[in-house]
Image (cartoon, rainbow, N blue to C red):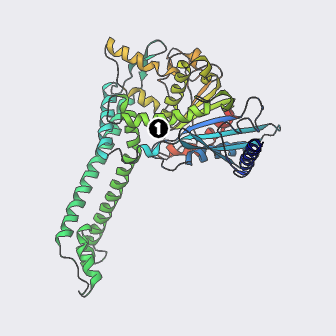
């Protein structure tokens, strides 16, 4: 009797504790909890979004916040009543998994609930890609592109897709574009090399000079004289007539030198932190020392995807998401593509009771600012003989999205690609569809130009705050 009473007390304590965990806006529990609440249909569940961040993005949850806010903004613009964002924390695969929950009631009084998850991989590449690794990667990529393109005329390359070799057209401007980028990169490498060599010599000159002493009269002036090698032309600026011809020339030279230092530091940082991520992830399409990093990044996307779709989870605890949207920005679009393919493959090779209907539940793949076409053309090895074609066929087998339209791109699925002409990283996606099919018509990739992403270079990050991405996201989640 006492044992039964103790069990009842223990159960009551546990239940009471679970009732007070969290707040109205912060929840803790199983991932499957709240996946069927506040949705359009209680039996079908909420909508999930898996977003993959792009290169150089270092802040955890930043991508979840940006995408959740885009959905909220569009829901409000569409006349909906939007509730405050809620967050939910669960434990999966030995770590904590957080999501943002966006809830609103539209103008027809239908409730909507969207759960936003993030595949956060930024720390995996931090400090593991050197400047010279990235420079080598860029020159190898340019060389590969030049080999398969021709000056001022269209050319072609072949790719294994949809059960055969498909001839893909390369535009006539491709060769010139690659040459321009190659020259720009080469110029930056020269500038960076020159600046760092000069700074090293200036540093050596400073160390060889006697240190200023505190007792010396005019200590501040002595310090300035000691640091003078870092400021070429300072003698003229300090001792010649102000605003004279020589003075203006010295000032101009000093300003150019400071500009070169700032540019070298900025470009070097961009090459390591941003392009370095691309090098680490894309290089392993051919054997490279980054193979382990690439697999770690892919596992991040796959593990979060497995949780969303319920792989490895007993059926009663599988999240009840009626549909899932996979999205990726920049390099994250390559990860999003690889993740969705891996999840479909996991479904394909699982036993009947372990399958989770990935194809049927995936509503859309949204890529924006995507370099996927460049990875298909520039960064991958091209087949030259029958042996290579066997390899290409094997490589295609792990990419179901280019294996069969009927099986893996049903009418319930859309692939939307948002890009801008001002964004040199992005572009139309032409190399993931059978060229015999109508361009830009489902089930082919639907390429859409973002008219608001119009500033050179900055266009690559402008998509997040623009109307087109918000509308496409809202269209699929609602």
Query: Which image quadrant is residue 77 in?
Result: top right
Number of numbered callouts drawn: 1
Which residue shows up at 83% across the image and 38% down it?
109
On the image, the x and y values in percent for residue 300 come to 49, 37
In depth, the one of 129 and 439 nearer the eye is 129
For label 1, the SS is: helix
Which quadrant holds the N terminus?
Answer: top right
Query: In the image, is 234 to the left or to the right of 173?
Result: left
Quadrant, the C terminus: top right
Residue situated furthest right in the rendering: 109
Q: Is residue 32 shown to the viewer in this render?
A: yes
Frontmost residue, 463 versus 209? 209
- Is residue 448 visible from the viewing direction of this image? no
Residue 260: image quadrant is bottom left
**Image-quadrant location for residue 185:** top left
Residue 388, given in percent of the width and then of the height, sits at 33, 16
Q: Is residue 199 above or below residue 146?
A: below
Question: Which one is in front, 322 or 334?
Answer: 322
For label 1, count other residues whose C-alpha is less than 10 Å away and answer few (under 14), some (14-19) or many (20+). many
Taking depth in this image into account, of 63 and 244 the one nearest to the observer is 63
Q: Which residue is mark 1?
A: 331
Q: Is residue 199 rendered to the left or right of residue 92?
A: left
Q: Is residue 155 above or below residue 23?
A: above
224 up-or-down from 39: above or below: below
Q: In the visual, does 294 lie left or right of 333? A: left
Q: Residue at x 35, y 45 (%)?
A: 128
Which residue is at a point 28% across and 64% down the rendered structure image?
253
Task: Specify whether 3 is left or right of 122.
Answer: right
Quick one: which residue is furthest to the front in this view? 1
Residue at x 37%, y 51% (from the top left corner): 269
The percent position of residue 256, horizontal first and vertical second, equals 31, 61
């Amino acid at each position: 009797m006492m044992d039964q009473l103790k069990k009842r007390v223990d159960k009551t304590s546990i239940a009471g504790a679970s009732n007070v965990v969290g707040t109205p806006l912060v929840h803790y529990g199983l991932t499957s909890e709240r996946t069927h609440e506040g949705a359009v249909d209680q039996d079908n569940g909420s909508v999930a979004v898996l977003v993959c961040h792009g290169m150089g993005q270092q802040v955890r949850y930043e991508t979840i916040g940006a995408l959740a806010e885009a959905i909220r903004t569009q829901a409000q613009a569409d006349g909906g009543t939007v509730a405050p964002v809620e967050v939910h924390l669960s434990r999966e695969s030995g770590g904590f998994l957080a999501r943002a929950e966006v809830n609103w009631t539209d103008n027809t009084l239908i409730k909507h609930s969207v759960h936003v998850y993030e595949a956060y991989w930024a720390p995996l590449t931090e400090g593991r890609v050197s400047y010279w690794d990235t420079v080598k990667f860029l020159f190898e990529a340019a060389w590969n592109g030049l080999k398969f393109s021709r000056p001022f005329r269209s050319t072609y390359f072949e790719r294994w897709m949809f059960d055969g070799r498909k001839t893909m057209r390369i535009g006539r401007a491709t060769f010139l574009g690659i040459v321009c980028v190659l020259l720009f990169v080469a110029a930056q490498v020269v500038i960076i090399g020159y600046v760092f060599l000069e700074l090293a010599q200036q540093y050596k000159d400073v160390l060889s000079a006697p240190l200023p002493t505190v007792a010396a009269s005019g200590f501040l002036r002595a310090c300035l004289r000691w640091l003078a090698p870092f400021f070429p032309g300072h003698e003229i600026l300090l001792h010649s007539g102000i605003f004279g011809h020589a003075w203006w020339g010295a000032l101009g030279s000093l300003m150019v030198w400071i500009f070169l230092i700032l540019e070298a530091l900025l470009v070097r940082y961009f090459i390591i932190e941003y392009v370095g991520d691309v090098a680490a992830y894309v290089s392993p399409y051919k054997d490279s020392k980054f193979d382990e990093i690439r697999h770690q990044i892919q596992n991040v996307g796959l593990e979060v995807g497995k949780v969303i779709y319920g792989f490895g989870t007993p059926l009663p605890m599988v999240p009840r998401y009626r549909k899932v949207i996979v999205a990726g920005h920049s390099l994250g679009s390559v990860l999003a593509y690889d993740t969705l393919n891996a999840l479909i493959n996991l479904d394909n090779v699982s036993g009947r009771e372990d399958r989770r209907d990935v194809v049927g539940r995936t509503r859309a793949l949204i890529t924006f600012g995507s370099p996927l076409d460049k990875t298909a053309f520039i960064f991958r090895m091209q087949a030259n003989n029958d042996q290579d074609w066997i390899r290409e066929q094997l490589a295609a087998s792990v990419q179901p999205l280019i294996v069969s339209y009927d099986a893996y791109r049903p009418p319930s699925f859309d692939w939307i690609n948002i890009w801008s002409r001002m964004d040199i990283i992005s572009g139309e996606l032409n190399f993931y569809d059978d060229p015999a099919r109508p361009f830009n018509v489902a089930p082919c990739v639907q390429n859409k130009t973002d008219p608001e992403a119009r500033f050179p270079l900055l266009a690559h990050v402008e998509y997040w705050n623009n109307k087109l991405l918000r509308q496409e996201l809202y269209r699929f989640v609602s």
